[in-house]
Image (tube, grey):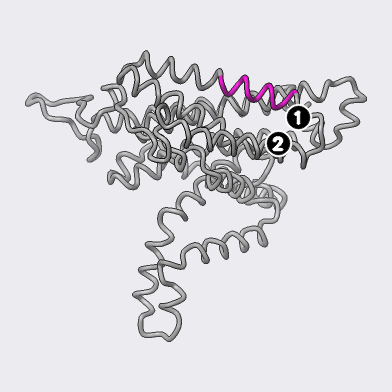
């Protein structure tokens, strides 16, 4: 019950984020949480449910984002560009995932992880080098469909002014957020369906004992390749949502190895092999990354008269405290927050 209560609170906050948190920064955090829930859950399909360790997840995320971004820059801010660019990103992700899976999933886990790391590194280098298409290190700035423009009025009063819904303007920014929210929600429910299907059961069997699953007649390599492709497609869809929300795509926002580390941390914090863990892990990590520095600044000012404490709580040391928080979470929740609470009867 505790887990469901936490998820319920997070879900309500995300659903009503434009009304509850009208400032630009808070909406950026809410949209990022929605996208990363999908990204983390899709990665959990690999590492948590199937036992596949991959470092190429950001590559597929980036392909979806770059495909959409390049099409929008070349063709203009139309839905045809979104559909074509997104489709090309999905196709490229599917082809690469199938090739990597069929050629590499036969080897041991550590070797497959190294193959995916190499593939992701090559993709990041290509994004930086092919600057005519990708914008290089500077990335791409582009316009999105008019529906998502802040100047677009979704609802107006008799005087033609934008209506406010509980204080939030009913404009293109709200439309963009709810496009991200409901897009993420649909992708998340698709993954829940996969986990609850016979395919999900086979994947868990492969994770627990690959040799036994093979002996039972399951073609392990094909199943592992299939889920690798599915996870890649979902990650690419998350990239499309990210590109439409940010109106900017670059190596740091879509292909950075730091994003891969964030995904791993979110999976561990939430709990591997639990779809609900992705919601809690992505939310906690995103909130910490955006607001921990602010909290430390307040704490530093509040303890100004105490020796050493203001220096220890200086905002510049937020990464140190983030690391400490992560260590404490792993210590007290060794199976992740959802996994540990479930074992203790909190589920």
Location of the N terminus by quadrant is top right
* Quadrant of the rendered image containing residue 66: top left
- Residue at 60% across, 27% down: 232
Instruction: Name the one closer to the observer, 220 or 104.
Output: 104
One can see residue 149 in this view = yes
Give percent across and percent down for residue 41.
59, 36
Please tell me how crowded label 2 is: few (under 14), some (14-19), or many (20+) other residues with Cα within 10 Å: some
Does 222 sit left or right of 153 as displayed? right
Q: Look at mark 2 in the image and give the residue it sits on.
A: 115
- Residue at 45% across, 79% down: 309
- Residue at 46% across, 75% down: 312
Instruction: Name the one closer to the observer, 250 or 231.
Output: 250
Give percent across and percent down for residue 214.
88, 25
Mark linked to residue 104: 1
Q: Main secondary structure of the magenta part?
A: helix
Query: Against 174, is 1 above or below?
Result: below
Is 96 one of the magenta-colored residues? yes
The magenta segment: 92-102
One can see residue 181 in this view = no
What secondary structure is found at the residue carrying circle 1?
helix
Instruction: Name the one closer to the observer, 172 or 82.
Output: 82
Give percent across and percent down for residue 286.
47, 49
- Distance from disc 1 to disc 2, alpha carbons, whole Å, reads 7 Å
Query: Against 315, is 98 above or below?
Result: above
Location of the C terminus by quadrant is top right
Are the residues flagged by discs 1 and 2 in contact, CB closer than 8 Å?
yes
Q: Earlier in the sequence, mark 1 or mark 2?
A: 1
Mark linked to residue 118: none
- Residue at 62% across, 28% down: 231
């Amino acid at each position: 019950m505790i887990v469901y209560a936490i998820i319920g609170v997070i879900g309500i906050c995300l659903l009503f984020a434009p009304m509850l948190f009208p400032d630009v920064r808070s909406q950026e955090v809410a949209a990022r949480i929605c996208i990363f829930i999908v990204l983390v859950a899709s990665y959990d399909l690999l590492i948590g449910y199937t036992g596949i360790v991959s470092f190429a997840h950001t590559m597929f995320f980036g392909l979806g984002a770059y495909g959409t971004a390049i099409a929008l820059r070349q063709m203009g801010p139309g839905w045809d560009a979104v559909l074509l660019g997104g489709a090309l990103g999905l196709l490229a992700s599917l082809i690469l995932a199938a090739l990597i899976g069929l050629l590499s999933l036969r080897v041991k886990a550590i070797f497959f992880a190294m193959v995916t790391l190499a593939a992701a590194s090559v993709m990041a280098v290509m994004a930086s080098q092919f600057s005519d298409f990708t914008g290089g290190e500077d990335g791409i700035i582009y316009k999105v469909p008019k529906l998502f423009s802040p100047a677009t009025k979704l609802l107006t009063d008799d005087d033609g002014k934008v209506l406010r819904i509980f204080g939030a303007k009913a404009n293109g920014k709200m439309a963009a957020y709810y496009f991200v929210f409901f897009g993420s929600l649909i992708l998340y429910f698709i993954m829940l369906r996969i986990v609850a299907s016979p395919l999900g059961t086979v994947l868990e069997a492969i994770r627990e004992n690959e040799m036994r699953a093979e002996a039972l007649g399951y073609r392990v390599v094909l199943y592992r390749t299939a889920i690798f492709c599915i996870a890649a497609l979902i990650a690419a869809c998350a990239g499309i949502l990210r590109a439409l929300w940010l109106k900017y795509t670059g190596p740091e926002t879509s292909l950075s190895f730091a994003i891969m580390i964030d995904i791993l941390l979110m999976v561990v914090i939430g709990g591997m092999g639990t779809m609900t863990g992705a919601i809690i892990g992505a939310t906690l990590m995103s909130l910490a990354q955006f607001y921990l520095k602010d909290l430390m600044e307040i704490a530093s000012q509040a303890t100004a008269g105490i020796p050493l404490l203001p220096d220890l709580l200086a905002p510049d040391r937020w990464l140190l405290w983030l690391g400490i928080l992560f260590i404490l979470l792993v210590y007290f929740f060794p199976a992740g927050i959802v996994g540990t609470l479930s074992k203790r009867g909190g589920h």
